[in-house]
Image (cartoon, helix red, strand yellow):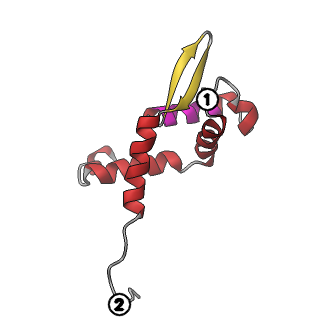
Amino acid sequence: MGVTKKEKFNQEQNEIATVAKVFAHPARIAIIQQLFKLNACVCGDLVNEIGLAQPTISQHLKELKNLGIIKGEVEGTSVCYCINDEVWNKTKKLLVNFLNQNIHSEKNCC
């Protein structure tokens, strides 16, 4: 979706699309699941746990951080990542509201 076309849609539609795009890669889902599983800031363990190269993990972490779903803090020579609770809860609410839409029609569509 080009930048100029985003203005044709409302803020919520653009937010849902952005979240869906970031969540569309299984490596990012695995990273999020690992961060929840460990329930702590993670520094470098993701390469061994997920089985992808460090540059690949770094690229996926960058996408998750750009969305704000994770946050990172510098500790010595490494960056430690964890789930950003505030953004996670906002994102969860956004997706739940979207996915909880119900069809209110008594007739079949097709």
Give yes or no for residue 92 being in the magenta stretch: no
Indicate whether 46 appears above or below 101.
above
Q: To which residue does mark 2 refer? A: 107
Q: Depth check: give the residue in front, 45 or 85.
A: 85
N-terminal-most mark, 2 or 1 = 1
Measuring from the top left, give residue 21's x and y in whole percent: 47, 49
Residue at 44% from the left image edge and 49% from the top image edge: 92
Q: For the C terminus, which image quadrant?
A: bottom left
Residue at 71% from the left image edge and 31% from the top image edge: 47
Closer to us: mark 2 or mark 1? Answer: 1
Task: Tell me the SS state at disc 2.
Answer: loop
Q: Depth check: give the residue in front, 53 or 66.
A: 66
Measuring from the top left, give residue 84's x and y in whole percent: 47, 33
Indicate whether 8 appears above or below 76.
below
Indicate whether 55 appears above or below 67.
above
Look at label 2 and name its amino acid: Lys
Give yes or no for residue 58 being in the magenta stretch: yes
Number of numbered callouts drawn: 2
Disc ID at residue 40: 1
Q: Depth check: give the residue in front, 5 or 48.
A: 48
Q: Quadrant of residue 8?
A: bottom left
Q: Which residues are magenta?
A: 57-65
Q: Is residue 51 left or right of residue 99?
A: right
Look at label 1 and name its amino acid: Ala
Measuring from the top left, give residue 108's x and y in whole percent: 39, 88
Q: Depth check: give the residue in front, 100 or 5.
A: 100
Task: Tell me the SS state at disc 1.
Answer: loop
Could you give the CA–CA distance between mark 2 and mark 1, rounded to whole angstroms? Answer: 49 Å
Residue at 46% from the left image edge and 51% from the top image edge: 20
Indicate whether 92 appears above or below 53.
below
Q: Is residue 3 left or right of residue 43?
A: left
